[in-house]
């Protein structure tokens, strides 16, 4: 009887030890699995962050290259093409004095055309040259673009600002302006619009920009993968801004750019 009790007690102890070992092994496995998953998630997050930083750096480099190209084009327009047109205008003026009255009218028209072209090129060279644009406040740069659109006669442009104007970093100001400029260009090229409204609203925590046209509109789902939209959204991403499109066929398009002021701006000079 005593022997049976000892055997039963021994079996119970073995059972307890077995359960303890199993629990220990399960605990070790759970801890190991949790640690492994945590390290895996940390690694994935690190890789994702590096990929995002790489894409942002790549987009920034592309933007800088494009800005340098625009700067070079602006200088070429102003210094070379502008000078050639100035010489052509001067030569026409000299030639007018040697013409008989019946031919003067034709050359006077040519002189006016060259003069208008010279004015337009000088205006365009300022708009696309980032260094020149850095001297303007954001709304002043947009006003210059609006003047250029007015001269084209293709679309009527209404421009307004709301709120107290405050400084925007030069690099970010140029990016915002380039987005606005590309939106306006798309309206002129594709929207078949008769009227375009641009509004800049300054608020304490953000700047909201609305660009609305009364054109033919488009299907956002079909256009979402277009290079134009992707490029504009990539530009907005560079400054942590949000760009959205609201459009319906035959009902025009509204583009909203929201630029937050509560993010860490890159290190560059401050504009106006």
Image (tube, grey):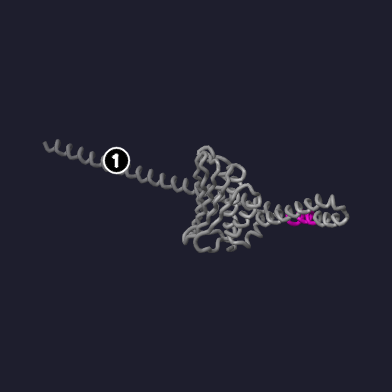
Q: What's the residue at 54%, 51% (across, down)? A: 197
Residue 269 in the magenta stretch? The answer is: no
Front in this rendered view, residue 242 or 213: 213
Local packing at callout 1 (Cα closer than 10 Å; few below 14, some 14-19, many 20+) is few
Relative to 159, is 111 on the left or the right? right
Q: What's the residue at 60%, 60% (across, down)? A: 140
> Which residue is identified by label 1?
22
| Picture coordinates of residue 213, whole percent (x, y) | 54, 47
The quadrant of the rendering that contains the C terminus is: bottom right
| Picture coordinates of residue 132, whole percent (x, y) | 66, 60
Total marks placed: 1
Front in this rendered view, residue 47 or 40: 47
> What range of the chain is rendered magenta?
76-86
Q: What's the residue at 68%, 51% (across, down)? A: 69
| Picture coordinates of residue 261, whole percent (x, y) | 49, 59
Tell me which corner region of the image, top left, top right, bottom left or bottom right, holds residue 1. Answer: top left
Q: What's the residue at 54%, 45% (across, down)? A: 214
């Amino acid at each position: 009887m005593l022997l049976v009790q000892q055997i039963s007690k021994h079996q119970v102890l073995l059972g307890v030890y077995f359960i303890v070992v199993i629990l220990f092994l399960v605990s070790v496995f759970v801890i190991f699995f949790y640690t492994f998953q945590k390290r895996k998630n940390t690694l994935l997050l690190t890789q994702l962050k590096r990929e995002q930083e790489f894409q942002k750096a790549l987009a920034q480099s592309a933007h800088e290259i494009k800005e340098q190209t625009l700067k070079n084009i602006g200088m070429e327009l102003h210094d070379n093409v502008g000078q050639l047109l100035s010489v052509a205008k001067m030569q026409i003026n000299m030639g007018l004095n040697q013409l008989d009255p019946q031919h003067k009218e034709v050359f006077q028209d040519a002189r006016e055309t060259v003069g208008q072209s010279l004015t337009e090129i000088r205006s365009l060279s300022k708009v696309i040259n980032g260094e020149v644009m850095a001297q303007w406040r954001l709304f002043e740069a947009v006003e210059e673009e609006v003047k250029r659109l007015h001269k084209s006669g293709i679309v009527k442009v209404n421009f307004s600002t709301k709120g107290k104007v405050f400084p925007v970093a030069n690099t970010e100001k140029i990016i915002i302006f380039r987005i606005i400029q590309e939106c306006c260009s798309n309206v002129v090229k594709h929207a078949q619009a008769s009227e375009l409204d641009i509004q800049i609203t300054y608020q304490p925590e953000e700047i909201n920009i609305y660009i609305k046209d009364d054109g033919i509109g488009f299907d956002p789902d079909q256009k979402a993968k277009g290079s134009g939209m992707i490029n504009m959204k990539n530009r907005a991403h560079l400054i942590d801004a949000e760009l959205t499109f609201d459009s319906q066929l035959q009902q025009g398009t509204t583009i909203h750019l929201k630029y937050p002021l509560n993010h860490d701006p890159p290190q560059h000079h401050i504009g106006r």
